[in-house]
Amino acid sequence: MNSMENDPGTPMAAAASTVQPARAHPVTLRQVAEAAGVSTATVSLIVNKKKGARIAADTRNRVRDAIRDLGYRPNAMAQTLVSGSSRFIGLVADAIATTPFAGQIIHGAQDEAWKHGYALLIANTEGNGELETDAIAMMLEYKVRGILYSTWFHRATAVPASLRESDFVLVNCFSTEPDARAVIPDEVQGGRSATDILLRNGHRRIAFINATTPAPAKDGRLQGYREALEAEGIPFDESLVLEAYPDQEGGYGATEELLKRGVTAVYCYNDRMAMGLYDGLRENGLSIPGDMAVVGFDNQEVIAAHLRPPLSTVSLPHYELGAAGVRMLLGLDESPADTAVKVHCPPVERSSV
Amino acid sequence: MNSMENDPGTPMAAAASTVQPARAHPVTLRQVAEAAGVSTATVSLIVNKKKGARIAADTRNRVRDAIRDLGYRPNAMAQTLVSGSSRFIGLVADAIATTPFAGQIIHGAQDEAWKHGYALLIANTEGNGELETDAIAMMLEYKVRGILYSTWFHRATAVPASLRESDFVLVNCFSTEPDARAVIPDEVQGGRSATDILLRNGHRRIAFINATTPAPAKDGRLQGYREALEAEGIPFDESLVLEAYPDQEGGYGATEELLKRGVTAVYCYNDRMAMGLYDGLRENGLSIPGDMAVVGFDNQEVIAAHLRPPLSTVSLPHYELGAAGVRMLLGLDESPADTAVKVHCPPVERSSV
DNA sequence: TAGATCCGATCAAACGTTTTAGCAGAATGG
DNA sequence: CCATTCTGCTAAAACGTTTGATCGGATCTA
């Protein structure tokens, strides 16, 4: 919230005098060459700091000055044309803004791409197939280095035909088709971690409020719950697994059923359900974590970190998913080729347990 | 949650046979031309559906077939090179993922850009000046049509020197420097709308919990509150304006002070404060809206729509900000040139009043 | 002093398009 | 039957780079 210091004491004038020439017709290599009295080849060599290039210090300076004076900027399009491949990575998302999650994927992808000298070209399709085809076509025309195909919630997906015309990796989704690299969150481990938080705090009778909506997360998070219980030698009790629609209302609505189970702790399919459950518990005069320990899943900042008490949960590694996607695309990680890479979901402990 | 129908009954084979040639060395115009037995000029004419072009139906078909068979894709880089200007719009953001808001700006910008045949090139700077300079340089090198410079919260900003080398518009921020077009939310109107919701429901004694952090929003939202009161002939009472840090904890912490004021309604600087206040009120045994009506500001979906009861608030038009930014950049709206364009903040009524 | 080596820099082709000018032949007009 | 117009198509320049081949001259080497 700072950075608002406009410093009116330092007028822009000084800075403006040196730069500011641009904006008319862009300066080209040739113009720089002429200004410096050399060939374009020479300028190119200097601009790109070519290793083997033998250039007299004097020449080098003249060229550098010309570049500065004219405000030269290389034309990336021309560079790409001659080099054949661009420094773009495409990211197509099915929902950019419906959720804070997509933003994290973009963020991770952008950071990692940037780190390797790539720029991100994004498109969101809002689930519209035609838009999606167009978006991919556009990326292909811009000769992207590869395409990240991402979904806002973890799910199975079909691979659009045109995607195969480029290098690609599936992010936060996967396909059963061959040759489809993918990176997804490790739901099972996440479920285990969530349950472990409760277990480590002495709880033995732990309910799990699962989602009603079918998804890899539904199966994985349940699986993790069972594994954690098993590791502690606690028999799995089917009756402790409830189901509700995965939002605040669902969590709230599950309160009554939950209380009948006589548990001391509950693990919710996601943070939003936990948020609703908080309300339900409170209405029943129960305190958290005193009367009931609660953990969520997703680590949705706006919610989890600011509930009363702050919610212990497991983080969905969207940032890391985006970054890992880029690395996989660029062949920086050793990818197992056939099976999707699972990214760890780190537990985040706060005070609801 | 559908679209998971993978339809195993339709093997990929059929589709794959026609396409699938690509991925080796990309097909060029010349190759298509040779395959069809015409010149590249002819192919270009056909690909671009040039109006004045006179092409025999027969030729047209041969070319079309060649294009399909070879799986030709135009090389946008080459096109850009010759045409001089690209179909890119750059978007530099200071925080892509810290908040759901940035996502909305991206979304709006992307939709609007796409509508006009532009693709979005994004970069996030995380407030890092060097990164920012690099990001803008990159965009300049890609010869973007223009740059959207956006901030995640509404504030004053300095215009980076290099931004001026291109067309640009400030989104969700503004500058006092000349020739800086900008589009920002109309905080004053928003404040008025928020207060009006309460006023229309018969409340006369309304508190305002403002933020402690200086920002255009702080001043604007207060101003709107005063204007709304004044319009109803209610004298402004300084003692009804509290201040707190603008998050859940702040709202919660303000409860006590608030209750001393004997008001029937409260307008919070943002939804997060309202969320905290909900907790505070509840702990005091007060019901919403029965004992106290509450409105927020921002319309942060995850929170506002799912609180109990759902929160009436005012929407921060981030999507529209992004879209309007693109329109302004492209010169599609009549821009007032000198002063920032204010975008309307629509009230969203739910059940907290 | 002739040949080799090295230095500093240039030439020119290539990348994949778009587009203007123009050309050959057919159709039309008088 | 010649002139004109129209039709269908092509040649070639241009866009701004990169890069391997080359080149003239100075400096060594023997």
Image (cartoon, coloured by chain):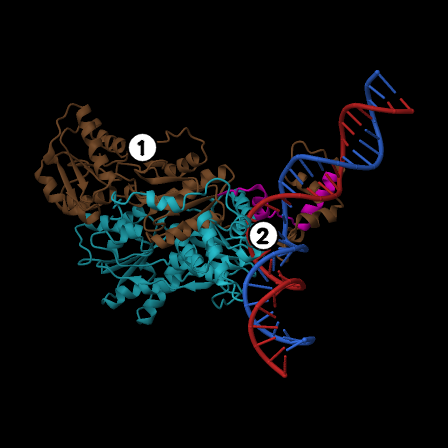
Chain colours: A brown, B cyan, C red, D blue
* Pointer 1 chain: A
Between A58 and B4, which is closer to the camera in this rendering? B4
Q: Residues within 10 Å of mark 2 (few under 14, many from 20)?
A: some
Left or right: B25 in relation to B200: right
Residue B225 visible to the viewer: no
Q: Which mark is residue A346?
A: 1
**Three-letter code for the amino acid on which mark 1 is drawn:** Pro
Q: Are marks 1 and 2 on the same chain?
A: no
Task: Give the answer, above or below, for where B96 lies relative to A186.
Answer: below
Nearer to us of marks 1 and 2 is 2
Outermost left residue = A260
Q: Are marks 1 and 2 in contact (CB under 8 Å)?
A: no
Residue B304 visible to the viewer: yes
Whether residue A74 appears in magenta in the rendering, the answer is yes
Q: Position of residue B132 (x, y in %)?
A: 52, 45
Q: Position of residue B70 (x, y in %)?
A: 46, 47
Residue extent of the magenta highlight: A59-88
Quickly name the residue at label 2.
B81
